Amino acid sequence: MKKLIDKSHYKPRIMDEAVERYLKLFGAVCIEGPKWCGKTWTSSFHCKSEFFIGDPKNNFQNRRLAEVSPDLILMGDAPRLLDEWQEVPSIWDAVRHTVDERGEKGQFILTGSSTPKRKGIMHSGAGRIGRLRMRTMSLYESGDSSGLVSLKDLCNGKLEQAMTGDVELLHLAYLIVRGGWPGNINVSAENASVLPKSYISAILEDDSQRLDDRKYDVQKMRLLLHSLARNESTTASQNKLINDIKGDSGRNEDDSVNRETVQVYLDVFNRLFLLDNQLPFSSNLRSPIRLKQAEKRHFCDPALACALLKATPERLVGDLNTFGFMFEALVERDLKIYAESFGANVYHYQDYGNREIDAVVELDDGRWCAFEIKLGANQIDKAAANLISISKSIEAAGGVAPSVLCVICGLTNAAYRRPDGVFVVPVTALKS
């Protein structure tokens, strides 16, 4: 059977190793994530047979077959790919039941670009179906990072100091505006935002309207997305989003939204994997320092925020404040991809003394590492001082201080350890 991809043309992804591991541990693997991030290609690379529920051939006969006889579409060499399973939610229970019947690992790979409501799904799949979250490409996966510095090694205090090469500000802006979608990697700078803009339109006008067989107000959803873009990489509350929307819509009362509407739309965006918020760090530091519990707001890719704000590479360079927030989003997207590959998780730190750490990488043994993210090399000294100050205050309060302090920078040409012990690493040198 001819498969979707030619393996010789496949561009490796960091999560390939996790997919292989999960196929050995579970009867089925479900790969979830935003549309066009590469789920189907990666799944096709790891499977031996395929079934595409959304194939439009013969008036969507595959979907009708899946609805009438889900057990029939499970027949095929294992691992068998079932692409966009959420189009027919009953497939989930059929897969779980077949996994139980066969009693073997690595039977199916499911992909999903939205999360259906629980209605129609009888069983969670716990123990049978392992879930993996896929994101758009990191800079290392797209070939825009040299990979000279391993995040895993860095989190264990290891760094081989090296010159990493100069980075141009305009090129860094281009990487942000372009985003990490595999189909957009080689696009020219002048066309970099075309795909992200069409992505947003597709989500609003098609995917969101099919999610619950319910019509949502596209204009109000777009207003909320604009507000989220203006608050990218911040802990903006829902009240702030609502007030921001009021200012955006002017005096048009028809465009006003209330808290309930915002909550419904945020839920829709999350179920479509459009958002990828950064959770607050809440580990027990064994100290009296109280940490705030607000999530840091992120799109699944900073290119979406840029598209909503009509930010070209040139406009970002002309607005360094906005550039800084978008750069932070880019780095934190990559940190999630790299950290999750070795069992770590990424959070942010914010205490009631108004002290903040941009990113926290918590290792599976409980150690944690603190990262400040700065666009310019002229900000490194201040960022390092902030990390040292917070670390000392945690220690003084009897808490567990971070084991590693690091500044991730956009415009530095070297990876090194400062005399004060703080590491400095260019984002264009990072890998997992």
Image (spheres, rainbow, N blue to C red):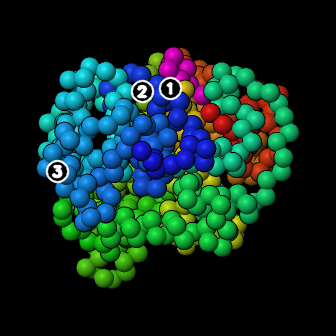
CA–CA distance in space, label 3 to label 1 = 37 Å
- Whichever of callouts 1 and 2 sits on the residue coming sooner in the sequence is 2
Number of numbered discs: 3
2 or 3: mark nearer the eye:
3
Q: Quadrant of the N terminus?
A: top left
Q: In terms of secondary structure, where does tag 2 sit? A: helix
Q: Main secondary structure of the magenta part?
A: loop
Q: Which residue is mark 2?
A: 22
Disc 3 crowd rating (10 Å Cα; few below 14, some 14-19, many 20+) is some
- Circle 3: residue type: Glu
Q: Residue at x 68, y 31 (%)?
A: 150
Q: Which residue is mark 1?
A: 343
Segment colored magenta:
362-369
- Whichever of callouts 3 and 1 sits on the residue coming sooner in the sequence is 3
Q: Residue at x 26, y 71 (%)?
A: 217
Horizontal placement of 185 versus 49: left or right? Answer: right
Can you see residue 362? Answer: no
Provide residue 418's location: percent of width, then percent of height. 81, 31
Disc 2 crowd rating (10 Å Cα; few below 14, some 14-19, many 20+) is many
